[in-house]
Image (spheres, helix red, strand yellow):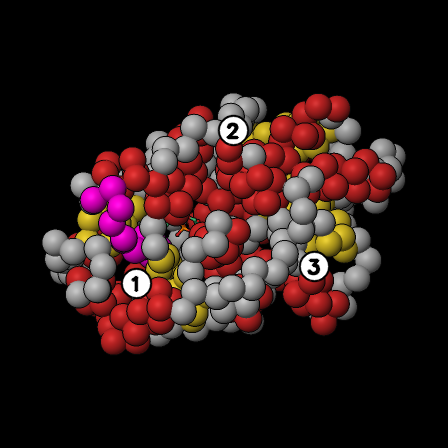
Amino acid sequence: MRVMTVVGARPEFIQTAPVSQVLRQQHLEILVHTGQHYDVRMSQVFFEDLGVPEPDYNLGVGSGSHAQQTGQIMIRLEPIIQDEQPDWVLVYGDTNTTAAAGLVAAKLSVPLAHIEAGLRSHDRTMPEEINRVITDHLSDLLFAPTQAAVDNLQAEGLVAGVHQVGDVRVDLLADLARWDVPEPAQTRQAQGLPADGVFALVTIHRAGNTDRVERLGGIVAALNDLSLPVVLPAHPRLQKMMARHGLTFSSNVQVIEPVGFLGMMALLQACAVVLTDSGGLQKEAYLLRRPVVTVRDNTEWVETVEAGWNRLCPAVPLAIQAAVAAALDTPPVAHPDYYGSPGVSGRICTVLETTHRPMARRPVLTAER
Ligand code: UD1
């Protein structure tokens, strides 16, 4: 098979690592980087950390409004798909890269496979929710990580092509021992903390939290006064918005540059609690058994909340501080296996192989001039 994988943002680089590895054992993968993320610490470090092969194409779209970013990806990707004639286009998650690549593939009648299909926050103010819905409805194969995702798809009438394979992060974390992740004591000392000290690992990057001063101000006030020290790898948007809103952190918060996947796993294993608005980190924390406070009104990873490992929380200082205290005081005991057993990437490849019909293309639609 010729499989074209299209990635562009941090979570996609992470998820493609185990899948690419399995795929390339028997098939040809053409890797396209849209350039949505371009800083070394937002992009290159993930390729290096996880041994993701060099992209065959880099579209270099960079930042912009949603329409600009999505449109530029579509314009630059279309001729590459036409030239390469892949059997599948493979996309991940919910970014502008995902939706743009999905639209181009579907309009060129190239079969589309979506990994991490079926997630829903049921919140259409999130750009990611729009991207998920569009991509799922365009896809020929929908690889759902959880039963909740399968149920969401069914509720929208999507049943054909849905496969519950588990979550690809399970493969990555099952393999963690083979990476060179520092010991927790070493990680704490590297952050200037006592070897046996506790700290909260914090990431905040969603537009819904950073762009409104009242929400970001509430989060900053909570962290400045939290009962334990904070280590915060700062996404470029957070850094930009802190400056724009004239907000500053107290000495309780150690702001560091964005870290790669292995750096993040080291921090996660060393921390006592996570506070975040990231989707991927909620799930990684669950898999590594760290309690989470999610500063959002909703989550796609509903099962982590049901199991008591994740608490949704408004951007209000006292509420955040209380949620962090509760997460530390009452660690849950049960840890259900929501995300499947290792071998997720292999299961995805098998479905791609068995569904692959080389000549079964629909006629390509040409736009009228
Ligand atoms: C995107 C995804 C989000 C995912 C996140 C991971 C969409 C709609 N959202 O959000 O689901 O959780 O990636 O990070 O696609 N920037 C830089 N350097 C970079 C990348 C970004 O400075 O390398 C800055 C730019 O100012 C940019 C802002 O960060 O405007 C936001 O980046 P963008 O790619 O638009 O979306 P993310 O917030 O990263």
Residue located at (47% from left, 43% from top)? 9
User: Within the image, what quadrant is residue 76 found in?
Assistant: top right
Mark 2 or mark 1, whichever is nearer to me: 2
Q: Earlier in the sequence, mark 1 or mark 3?
A: 3
Q: What is the distance, in whole Å, between disc 1 and disc 3 at their CAs?
A: 30 Å
Of residue 274 and residue 26, the one placed in the foreground of this image is 274
Q: In what element is the residue under mark 2?
A: helix
Label 3 belongs to which residue?
A: 137
Residue 227 pos. (x, y %): 21, 64
Which one is earlier in the sequence, the residue at label 3 or at label 2?
A: 3
The three-letter code of the residue at mark 3 reads His
Which secondary structure lies at badge 3? helix
Please tell me whether mark 3 or mark 2 is closer to you in this view: 2
Mark 2 and mark 1: Cα distance apart in space: 39 Å
Q: Which residues are magenta?
A: 194-205
Q: Is residue 18 depicted above or below 56 in this figure? A: below
Q: Quadrant of residue 357?
A: top right
Given the image, on which type of amino acid does mark 1 rest? Asp
Query: Is tag 2's residue or tag 1's residue first in the polypeptide sequence?
Result: 2
Amino acid at pointer 2: Arg
What is the crowding at mark 3: few (fewer than 14 residues within 10 Å), some, or many (at least 20)? some
Q: Is residue 352 visible?
A: no
